[in-house]
Image: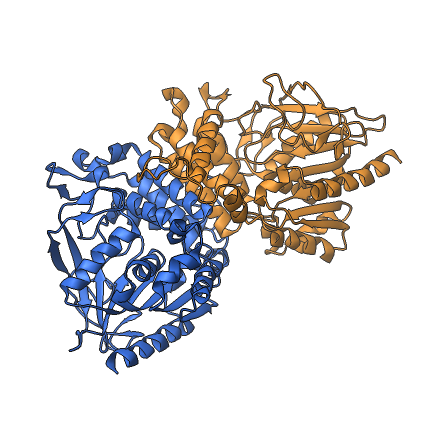
Chain colours: A blue, B orange
Amino acid sequence: MVSLGLVTPQQMHFSEPLPLKCGAVLADYQLTCETYGALNATRSNAVLVCHALNASHHVAGVDAQGQRGWWDNLVGPGKPLDTERFFVIGVNNPGSCFGSTGPMHVNAASGRVWGADFPVVTVEDWVDAQVRLVQRLGITQLAAVLGGSLGGMQALDWTLRHPEKLRHCIAVATAPNLSAQNIAFNEVARRAIVTDPDFHGGHFYEHGVVPKRGLRVARMIGHITYLAEDAMDAKFGRALRAAELAYSTQEIEFQIESYLRHQGDKFSEYFDANTYLLITRALDYFDPASAHGGDLARAFAAARTNRFLLVSFTTDWRFSPARSREIVKALVDNRIGVSYAEIAAPHGHDAFLLEDPRYHGVMRAYFERIAAEVQG
Amino acid sequence: MVSLGLVTPQQMHFSEPLPLKCGAVLADYQLTCETYGALNATRSNAVLVCHALNASHHVAGVDAQGQRGWWDNLVGPGKPLDTERFFVIGVNNPGSCFGSTGPMHVNAASGRVWGADFPVVTVEDWVDAQVRLVQRLGITQLAAVLGGSLGGMQALDWTLRHPEKLRHCIAVATAPNLSAQNIAFNEVARRAIVTDPDFHGGHFYEHGVVPKRGLRVARMIGHITYLAEDAMDAKFGRALRAAELAYSTQEIEFQIESYLRHQGDKFSEYFDANTYLLITRALDYFDPASAHGGDLARAFAAARTNRFLLVSFTTDWRFSPARSREIVKALVDNRIGVSYAEIAAPHGHDAFLLEDPRYHGVMRAYFERIAAEVQG
C-alpha cells in the first residue's frame, strides 16, 4: 500500500451565519479541512469522515509537521477506505482547536478572544456546518458519512436530518446517547479543568497561562475509559517502574502511573481547555430519541433511504456493543438495511482507531460495495 | 431490632514503636476505637471490623455528633453481627483522619504537623497495629476478623501473617490485589489532589487552606467506580436538573452531575488530603502473592487453620466477583474451608455497605455458626 504522503489543509471561510441549537449564532466562521483522492465526474464518490473528541481534519497522510493522520491506517491508496476510488473529506468541527473557528480565536463582535464565551456547539451544529462544506465542494449526495465514537454520532445525525444528502452511514464504536456513567466521567473531567486556578473562568489566554493540571487529569480519566481493563492488565499489570518500591504517595511506582502521567502531560501541551469542555458537552447532549419520547426507532424513521454499517468492539465498556445493538434494533424496526459487526478485539474503545484484520476486513468489504454502487 | 444507641470512642496510646513496611518507624501512636457488646468469660467472642478508604472506628450505633456508624445496618443487637453475642471492635487505622495518629497530627520528633511527611502505611502495618490493640484488650484469639473492600484486604492479611490469632476471616467485596485499572483510578485521584495549588506539597495545614478542588475530583472519580453503570442509569439516567437545557459547559444540566458535585463537596469538607493519598497507596501496594512469585495459593498456605467467608456482588466492577473467586480458588487449592456467596445485587461496589436480604442472610448464618463454635 502506498501512503498518501504529504497532505495540506485548506481553510474555507463561510460568511452566512450559522444558527446553533443553543440559540446563539456564529456570524461567520472558517472550517479547516483536508481532502484525499479525486471527485469523480458524477460527483458521487465523496466520503465525509467525522472526528471524535481530540482529533481533527487531519485524517490521513502526513502533514507539514510530520504528523500522520489519526485514521491513516484506514484511509489511503489501497486501504479499506481507498482514496483511489473515493474522494475523502476530513473537516475540523467549529469549537475544536485545530484550525476551525473555536474558543481561542477572536470574536469579531467583541474584539476579544472567545474563551469560555464561545457558544455551546452540538453534534447537530457540526453536521449543519459539514452540510455547507459539502455543498461548497459541489457535492449533492455523499457516498457515505463515516465516524467513530463522537464521529459516529455525527454520521448518525446526517441520516436523521439530511437523509437525502448521503447514501451510507458508517458508525463505529458509538452510542445513541451517553449513559449516566458516560456523563459522569465527562463531568469529572470538566470539573478538573474548570476548578484549575489557571482556567480563569475560561479566559486563561489573557493571563498567558493554560489550565494544564486540569487538562492532565481530564485526559488521564479519558484514557482509563478508552482502554479495556484486561488489556490494561496485559500491557501494564502491576509492573513496577523501578526494581524496588519507593514507598511514596507522589512518586511513580507502577508503570500504569507512568503511562497515564505521560498521556496527560502530552495532551495538556496541545489541547485547548475550552474545546475539551465544549466537545464533552456535545457528547452529553446528543440524544436523537429525546425528541421522540425516548423512542429511537421513531427517530430513525427519517433515515429510510439510507443504508448503515455499525461496528462495535467486545471489550469497549465506554460505548459497549449493547449500545450499538440499540441502534441496529431501531433500524431493523424501520426495515432499514443495516450490516452489523461485533469485533472481538481486546483494546476497548480505542479499538476503533487501531488496525485489526477482521475490523478492517469488514470496512473494506462495505466500502467495496459502496464503490460498486457509485461507479455503476 | 434495638439500636446500639449512643456509642463513645476510646483513645488508646501505644508507646512501643511500630516498625512500618516502608522502613520508617512510628515512635509512638494512638488508636481511636469503639467496642460494642461484652467480651465473654473465655474472651472468645471478639470480632474485629476493619475499615475501608473513608470510614473509621465508628462502625455502629450513633456517636456524639449524631452520626450513625458506617456498618450500622450489619452490626448491633439482633443484627447479622449480633452485639448481644459478640464483642465487636472498630478501630481507626494509623494514617487515617478520624482520631488515630495521622498526617494532621504533630510529629513529636520535629514539632511540626506531619502532613506529607507521614510515613507511607500499608495493610500489613495496619494489621500489626490492630494485633497490638487486640492484645491490649486481653484477647488471644479473635472469633473473626471482618472487612469489606480495603477492609477485606486487612482481614485476609490477618490470616496470612497471624493465622493463630483468629478463627474466621470474612472478606466482602475485596480482591487479592489491585488491577492496573484500579491503580489507574487511584493515580488520577492522587494527581488531582497533589496538583491542587492548595496542596502545598502536603503541608497545606500551615497555610490554613485545604486542597478542596483536588479532593472533590478524587471523590467524584471514586463514586463512579463504587456504583454499577446500570444502577446509575436506573437512578439518574439522563434526567435533567431543570425543565430546559441551559446549554452551558459549567452549569449543571444532568442530575448525575448534581449528585457527583454534591458528593465531592461533602467529602472535601471532612476528609484529609494526605490520608487520601496514603490510603489509596495502601490499596495499590497490597499484593500477598507477590512474595510467592505471584502464586496466591502459596501465600494462603499460611492460613491453613482459618476458615473463610468470601462475599462478592455481581455488579461490582471495582472488585468484581472474579477477584473474589481468585481468593476462593487459592483457599480451595490449600483445602482450607471457605464459604463463598456471589450476591446478585444491583448496587456495584457500594453493595457491601447496603442492606440486602440475601447478603445479610449469608452474613447472619455465618456469624451464627461462629457463635455456636465460640460458645460451645
Query: Quarter-wise, where is residue A84 in the image?
Result: bottom left
Q: Is residue A10 above or below residue B22?
A: below
Query: Quarter-wise, where is residue A158 in the image?
Result: bottom left
Q: Closer to the camera, A282 or A105? A: A282
Image check: A82 left or right of A310? left
Image check: A182 left or right of A112? right
**Residue visible at 40% across and 63% down in the picture:** A351
Give the residue furthest to the right. Answer: B376
Give the residue furthest to the top. Answer: B64
Q: Position of residue B263 (x, y in %)?
A: 47, 32
Image check: A260 left or right of B39? left
**Residue visible at 46% across and 18% down in the picture:** B111
Quadrant where the C terminus of chain A lies?
A: bottom left
Q: Can residue A262 be spotted in the picture?
A: no
Q: Closer to the camera, A225 or B299? A: A225
Give the residue furthest to the bottom. Answer: A376
**Residue visible at 39% across and 41% down in the picture:** A187
Image check: A185 left or right of B143? left
Q: Closer to the camera, A207 or A242? A: A207
Q: Is residue A309 above or below residue A318?
A: below
Q: Position of residue A211 (x, y in %)?
A: 27, 38
Q: Can residue A108 be spotted in the picture?
A: yes
Q: Is residue B19 above or below residue B285?
A: above
Quadrant where the N terminus of chain A lies?
A: bottom left
Q: Position of residue A204 (x, y in %)?
A: 22, 36
Q: Position of residue B338 (x, y in %)?
A: 75, 50
Q: How many marks?
A: 0
